[in-house]
Amino acid sequence: MANWRDKILERFGPDGDTLTIVHDPDRLLTEEGVLNGIMGNGYEVLTYEDPIAFRYAYEANYRSAWDAGESKRLVVLVQTAPDLDVLP
């Protein structure tokens, strides 16, 4: 029988999307086993906390890489904002 971590990790397979945005107010994805599983499948994880710091990290590390044809995969964790429309 699958545990709760396996149910979450099903969404982050090795052939997943380039960009995934997750609203995670309970911080389930920051639990060590889940986080290691996500990163083990080739994703990088960026937590959205400060809009300016996020925008800088996103543009410098991900958007420029994607524009250059690199195949980075990113999970953006939004933990505190009740509305995903706050993302830049």
Image: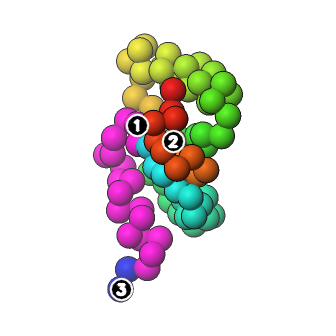
Circles 1, 2 touching at the beta carbon (< 8 Å): yes
Residue 26 vertical position relative to residue 4 in the rendered view, above or below: above
Q: Amino acid at mark 1?
A: Leu
Residue range corresponding to the magenta coloring:
3-20
Going by the image, does 4 lie left or right of 16?
right
At a point 41% along the width and 15% down the height, the residue shown is 67
* Number of numbered markers: 3
Q: Amino acid at mark 2?
A: Val
Which of marks 2 and 3 precedes in the sequence? 3
SS category of the residue bearing label 3? loop
Q: Residues within 10 Å of mark 1 (few under 14, many from 20)?
A: some
SS category of the residue bearing label 2? strand
Q: Mark number for residue 19?
A: 1
To which residue does mark 2 refer?
A: 76
Which of marks 2 and 1 precedes in the sequence? 1
Tell me if I can see residue 75 in this picture: no
Indicate the colouring scheme.
rainbow
